[in-house]
Image: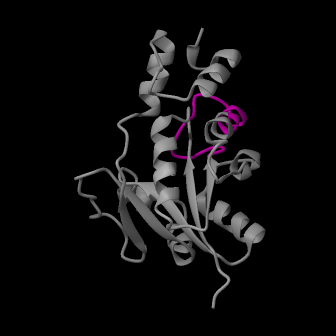
Amino acid sequence: MSDRKRIGVFGGTFDPIHFGHVHLLTELLNSKKFDDIIVIPAGDPWQKNPKVPGEYRFEMTQIALKELPLKVSDLEIKRNGPTYALDTYQELEALYGEQDFVWIIGSDVVNSLSSWHEIERLAQSVEFLVVKRPHSKVDVTNVPAFVKYSEIEVNALDISATQVRNALANGDVLAGLIPDNVAQFIKSKGLYGAA
């Protein structure tokens, strides 16, 4: 009998974290596919340009997920330079030992996997779980043959961080978009143009 745990790794810019993320993580926890889930806000993601510093995104993520039985890690926030998934995997392995790490990605990301830094090395060590929206087909035409992946359908909420940032900048009502405690944190720090 193996002592290896199946650990889900869910990274993102969380700029800011919103109910779409919270709902997805709740669904993943309910799926019983994982022994543990680690949520990792990106430090300096080389393919994106976050609007607020990593420390704030990490704090917001902690606030939003504090009721869920998972871990929020600052591994990438503490790292200097560009954030690569391979480095994160190596740090996780050093912390947790040899486990079965599963990178949780959205169906919108799967086709760009071939552009990930040293994807071949990462794919030798982890498998991917592609979260697909209900009744949508995942386009895997550009996924390299060496990538091991499976798919899960969740009843995803149609919310984006861009939508949340626009609502904040315009002073719109945030009900249903982000948790109240996250909205309070954003307001207290004056993030995203919130007044």
Q: At x 44% / y 28%, what residue is drawn?
A: 162
In terms of depth relative to the viewer, which is nearer, 157 or 195?
A: 157
Residue 93: % across, % down: 70, 71
User: Can you say which quadrant of the picture contains the N terminus?
Assistant: bottom right
As displayed, is residue 78 above or below residue 191? below
Q: Quadrant of residue 36?
A: bottom right
> Is residue 54 magenta-colored?
yes
Residue 127: % across, % down: 49, 72
Residue 117: % across, % down: 54, 60
Q: Quadrant of residue 118?
A: bottom right
User: Can you say which quadrant of the picture contains the C terminus?
Assistant: top right
Question: Is 25 left or right of 43, judged from the image as shown?
Answer: left
Q: At x 55% / y 67%, what residue is drawn?
A: 34
Magenta span: predominant SS is loop
Q: At x 64% / y 43%, what residue is drawn?
A: 67
As displayed, is residue 189 above or below residue 36? above
In terms of depth relative to the viewer, which is nearer, 154 or 44?
A: 154
Q: At x 54% / y 72%, what residue is drawn?
A: 126
Question: Is 26 left or right of 146, judged from the image as shown?
Answer: right
Total marks placed: 0
User: Which span is picked out in magenta?
Assistant: 42-59
Residue 41: % across, % down: 63, 45
> Is residue 173 magenta-colored?
no
Question: Is 172 left or right of 88, judged from the image as shown?
Answer: left
